[in-house]
Image: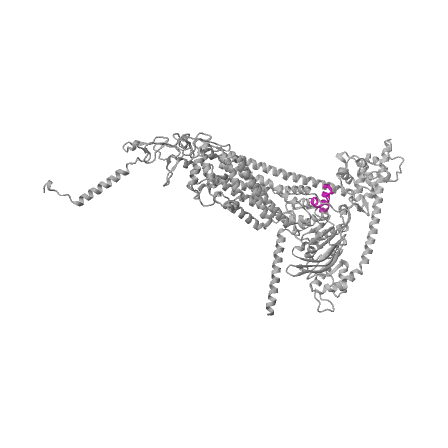
Amino acid sequence: MSASTMVVRPDFLIAVLLVATLYGQALGQNSTCPAGYYCPNNNLSNQIICPEGYYCMQGSTAPTTCDFNWLLQYAPDTIIPSGEDNPITAAEAVYFQGQALAGNLCPKGSITPTQSCPAGYYCPNTTTKIICPDEHYCKTGSAAPWNCSFFSVCDAGSDSPRVTYTAVIGIVIILFAIYVGYVLIFLWVRVKRRRNTEALEQREALVSAIAPLLGPKYDPKTNHLKLFSKVKPKVSIAFRELCLTLKSGATILKNVTGEFKHSKLYAVMGPSGAGKSTFFNTLTGSAASYGTITGTVTINGQEGVNLSAYKDVVGFVPQDDIVHEDLTVRENLAFAAYLKLDKKVSGQECQEVADAVVDMLGMRHIAHSIVGSVTKRGISGGQRKRVNIGMELVARPSVCFMDEPTSGLDSTATLEVLSALKSLALCGMNISAVIHQPRYSVFILFDELLLLAKGGLTAFMGPTEQMLEYFESTGFKMADNENPADFMLDVCSGSIPRANDPNFKPSDLNGLWFEHGVQFVEARRSQAAEFEISRSHLATESSIMMNERIHAIRAELLHMAKRKARNAHDPLPGDGDHTGSPVHASGDLLGQYHLDLPEMKTFLETLVQGQVEEEDVAALMKAVAPQNTGSVAAADILAFVVTGKYKEHLYRSSSIASRGGSNVPGAGPDIKSFVTNGDVEVGIQEKDCLGNPVNRQGRSTGFVFCVLVMRLLVKKARNWQDMIVNLLLMLITSSIAGLVSGASYAPNQYLTNVNTAFLVFGMIMVVASNNVFGSDRIIYIRETKAGIGTTALFTAVNVVHLIDVFLLPLIFTGMFYGFMQPVCSFKWFYLSMLMCSWYSSGLAYVASVLFSPVNSVVAAAAYALIFNAFVNGVNTPSAVSSNGSQYRYLNGFGQFLAGLSYNRWVVEIVTIKEYEFYDYYLQPSTHYIMASVGLCGTSSYPSPYDSRCTPEQYAQTLSTVTLNDMVTSNYCQPGDYMMWDFLAVLLLGAVYRLFAYIALWMKLRPEVPGPYVALKKLVEAGIDKAKSWGKKEKEPRAQE
């Protein structure tokens, strides 16, 4: 076939056309200049690599500068790659996505202007990359090096500061200072206690030396009782047909009638379940919170008076040993005396009363021993019981109720305690005690007995010596050698049969009492009256003998003084007077006359008419002689003899008369002003309890507050080991938090780091503050029932706990700040942590008051976790998204809940102070972060992740916004926002404390009908009403 005749096949032509089409498409795709290059005039054959400082997108015909400042000023609509399908302009990248104005690097062939300067370098412009110098660090995207802080070191090329030992050493120094401070306080308490011990030992030596010389009147125990002769007013209580019915309808106390007179010791006895403790609660009115009280109670003959209104003269010893376990025995009693005694009682007398109770209860050998607890070894259980009793006795109450004061004591200790109570009753106290099966020698110490049978019925009320005779007269026979106390309990429980009454039941004892017992006891009252009259005569005779002894002592001192004056040829101030009468002797003469050791020995031997050991005289002179002069004024010796107690201000080398100590001319106080019926007379002439011109005046709130603060400080100083452990744990926790956060954080990671730090510290503070009220709540209840004001108590606890509130955030901030190295100053970081501490401690107060110690930690921690971790408004700001957890996405109620979180406020504080110090080129980035969360009023600013923002909002913002609007100090206005942040946290902490105070007041004073009690009563009344309506509706139906 010839060429001219060749035929082209159709399928070949189709293939050629297909190849040509594909080739043409390939040429069309490569007609655009590739990324990283630019092609002038779109000439693909002239592809030029993008120079430094510029970027070239795909299809670029000319390079575009990477300088965002120039782009915003001259070409804000320049398109830059955004990594998304829709490219954005330079203005949108800066204003809406937080693109930094500098710190970017564009090497040759750059395809985007957003490439950040690498870590360890800083880029002052878009073409230069410089290694970070010494003493500086350079994070990713740095346009200038950051200064290294004092607590860190930075080598060349560092991308973050490296913590040195300086921070650790600083924290160790702080801890050491804290340790030294606590040790100093502990030593001060210890020295003070030692000095008190030495003073007491000196006093005891003095009393021991002179007591045998002055007769039995100056026995130490007798001197102690003189302090309790001031038990006034004298209070007698009568009760008639006293009943208590529980809300369930059960009657546990029925028709109890009797009388507790002053100056007597009463025993309340009965089998288990007879209502002995309930009787005390009913008599004092405290049982009204769980039942209905009926009957009549009279105080000194007057009806309609509640014992709870006289807390200053009524004491109650609880069955449980409620004492301060961190204090010594004497400290427990001394602080109780300061708080409970009349405000006119001096501090010296408070100390003397505490010492007297220590001696009377036989606790001198353990006076300075820590009481201790189950976990901390201290005194024994029986000794704790005596401390429990002593805390009420130091108040010198007119009436004292004791719930099982001898439980836990052995027979010897029981006898010692009851003997002391018997002596106090003779001083005017009205003491009644619940007691179980005492031995006979203890039982006979009680003046009268109230015996309750099962069901709260009266079985006997009268003198203890008449109890056995009464029961034998009603048909009960006691076996030989049996304890009468055990016998009467067996009778009440039905274990002993009644003669000629086979159907006898214990409940019959109440009928027997009202039929025969009342008349039986009244018939023998005359014998008791005769006994009291004879005892009064004996007391009067003893007083006359003591008066004569003091008269003789004064006469002998005056005689020796005049004889010495005549020998010295001095004029006698008293010449011409009746020297035989010491009452008319000159006070100046006895004030000027001083006795040395030999003269004192002669004087004492003359008094006792016998030999006196020189050691005893030396001990007396050593204690009495001022400043080791070896002599003492005769007037001071006389004053000591008359008062019978050691008073340091009397032992001076000046006369009592010159100090105004004499009531009449003569040396020393007048005998009549001190001695009445053998007892020291009260300087304050108080009257009866009711309807009289003078009543006891309690301590002022300010004084009680100061005493409580001192007590809490002593307890805190004594637990300094626990405090050091807490501080070490705080250091470890803050170190871990700081290491996790690190110092190489980006601006958008800052909020996450500080949010976590504040959350961790707040949770620790909640747990650490939880035992402020919870651990001692039962003690506070006892003290407020005794009349201690809730306001003073709550304020004192708050003030002392401020030590922890200020100290713990300092420790945490010091370590965390050292590891994280924020730009925000340490001052603002600490103040923010302090606000967190204030908030968290207040929250812990509320939980510790409302809940039990077991549940309060969980309750407070759960509340803090919910509001400060999940509903804080600043959650996960490093990964901002439209998940609704940020403040800007919350509605009004959600923002209110977020406002209850301290993180919402303190994070804003430290963020403002952090971003405020960032360079100008980073301000768009910080503004983007703040707007994404909604802080500083930026909730309405458009955010690319907020789907609620419309294109119109973006356009409106772009037309008005400037770079100055992005500066933190401009839009955040630190003076306004930070002030409100601080006020918000302060207010929240104050509100929590107010809630805690109200809750504590309601719990400590349950007899006061607070809002909760009123609401509870209202609900109960509604339920009862509904039940009554239901019964009325059922009755007609039943009839039908």
Tell which of 320 and 299 is nearer to you.
299
- State yes or no: residue 92 in magenta: no
Residue located 65% across and 40% down the image? 189
Question: Residue 298: x, y in percent?
Answer: 75, 55
Quarter of the image for residue 981 reads top right
**191 displayed left or right of 808:** right
Asked if residue 1009 shows in the view, the reply is yes
* Region of the chain picked out in magenta, as a range: 337-358
Question: Residue 921: x, y in percent?
Answer: 44, 32
Tell which of 949 and 350 is nearer to you.
949
- State yes or no: residue 350 in magenta: yes
Number of numbered discs on residues:
0
**535 displayed left or right of 247:** right
Residue located 77% across and 38% down the image? 650
Q: How is the image coloured?
A: one colour
Question: Residue 985: x, y in percent?
Answer: 56, 41
- Main SS of the magenta part reads helix
